[in-house]
Image (cartoon, rainbow, N blue to C red):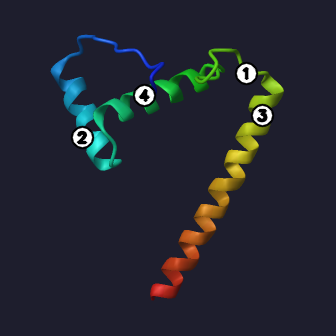
Amino acid sequence: MKESDVQLNLRVPTVVRDSIAQAAKKNRRSVTAEVIVRLEESLAREGVNPETGERIDPGEMIRLLGDLASRLALVEDSFEASTKNQK
C-alpha cells in the first residue's frame, strides 16, 4: 500500500463481499487487491487510465488491445506446448 493511498469505507451486499473474497482466494490476492484490480479493469473498459484518471486515446487503446492479444496468443501457445509435452 502506498502512502498516497486513501481508505474507502463502503457497504456492499453480503453476496458481493463473499464473491469478492472467493475470487481473491482463487487469484491469491487480498480482498483489497481483488477490489482494486476489478475497479481498474472496469475503468480501463470505459477508456480511462486507472493510474492517471485520464481518458485513453482510442488509437492507444487499439494498440494496447493488440499488444494484449499478442501476449495472450503467446500464453496459449506455451500452454498448448506444455500440455503436449505431458502426454
Q: Name the quadrant containing residue 29.
A: top left
Amino acid type of the residue tagged 4 in the rendering: Ile
Q: Which residue is mark 2?
A: 22
Residue 62's disc is 3
Tell which circle, 2 or 1, labels the residue nearer the N-terminal end.
2
Which comes sooner in the sequence, label 4 or label 2?
2
Q: Of callouts 1 and 4, which one flags the residue occurring earlier in the amino acid sequence? A: 4
Q: Position of residue 5 (x, y in %)?
A: 44, 20
Residue of label 1: 56
Q: Alpha-carbon neighbours of circle 1 within 10 Å: few (<14), some, or many (≥20)?
A: some
- Please report the residue visible at 79 percent of the width from the left and 38 percent of the height from the top: 63
Residue at left 24%, top 40%? 22
Between the C-alphas of marks 3 and 1, the distance is: 10 Å
Type of the residue with mark 3: Ile
Q: Residue 56: percent from the left, percent from the top?
A: 73, 21
Residue in the picture at 24% in, 15% down: 12
Residue farthest front in this picture: 3
Q: Residues within 10 Å of mark 4 (few under 14, many from 20)?
A: few
| Cα distance in 3D space between marks 1 and 4 | 19 Å
Q: Which mark is residue 36?
A: 4
Q: How many angstroms separate mark 2 from mark 3 (CA)?
A: 32 Å
Q: Position of residue 6 (x, y in %)?
A: 40, 15
Dot placed on the residue nearer the N-terminal end, 4 or 3: 4
Q: Quadrant of residue 30?
A: top left
Rounded to the nearest angstrom, the CA distance separating label 4 from label 2 is 15 Å
Secondary structure beneath dot 3 equals helix
Contact flag, marks 1 and 4 (Cβ < 8 Å): no
Instruction: Report helix, strand or loop for mark 1.
Output: loop
Nearer the observer: mark 4 or 2; the answer is 4
